[in-house]
Amino acid sequence: MYLIVGLGNPEEDYSNTRHNMGFNTINKLAKQYNIEINKSKFKGLYGVGTIEEKKVILLKPQTYMNSSGESIREIIDFYKIEAKDIIIIYDDIDIAPGIIKVRKKGGPGTHNGMKSVVEHLKTQEFARIRVGIGSPKYKDDLINYVIGAIPEEDIEKLDKGTTLAKDAIIEIIKSGVDIAMNKYN
């Protein structure tokens, strides 16, 4: 069983922000595979289904970004999911919009949501997909840039990134993370 986690903030207030690229990717995956994300438990919203003949859980933590690891820890403890079967999707300011990076493992970098994930999972040995959002013109504007509304001219590039991330997840499930890295990086 795979646990596929999109990082973001509760959608009612943050659905149209760069910080929700993880949630947006999960939403696309859920739509393509008819997986309803309608269960509320483990400090998150989740749904169970099948992708490429493999059982999956799609999770959107509702703890706010900086505490995402709490939700993930609860669900992996309950379902006894191993780190090798976890895929985390999140936004990255160091990658241009419309570009993704797939990694087999690694540190959290400067991303506070990933810092929480690594802290709660006590490992860095899980796949992750970073969805590029670019960086603000002025570093002082970072918070508004990631949680503010997305300007119309940026929506198409960001949408391309979440579509690529969705496709990369499917590739990981079908062929493994190494092949997905070769195909999407």
Image: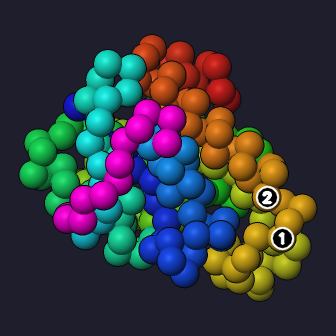
Does residue 9 appear left or right of residue 163 in this picture? left
Instruction: Give the residue pinned by disc 2.
Output: 155
Q: Residues within 10 Å of mark 1 (few under 14, many from 20)?
A: few
Does residue 169 appear left or right of residue 149 in this picture? left
**Residue segment shown in magenta:** 31-42
User: Could you tell me which residue is drawn at 46 percent across and 60 percent down?
Assistant: 7
Specify whether residue 58 is painted magenta.
Answer: no
Quick one: 54 or 70, which is closer to the camera?
54
Three-letter amino acid code at the position of disc 2: Ile
Specify whether residue 36 is painted magenta.
Answer: yes
Quick one: 13 or 122, which is closer to the camera?
13
Q: How many labels does the image show?
A: 2
* Quadrant including the N terminus: top left
Three-letter amino acid code at the position of disc 1: Pro
User: Could you tell me which residue is drawn at 50 percent across and 71 percent down?
Assistant: 11
Instruction: Give the residue pinned by disc 1.
Output: 151
Percent position of residue 166, x then y: 56, 37
Cα separation between marks 1 and 2: 7 Å
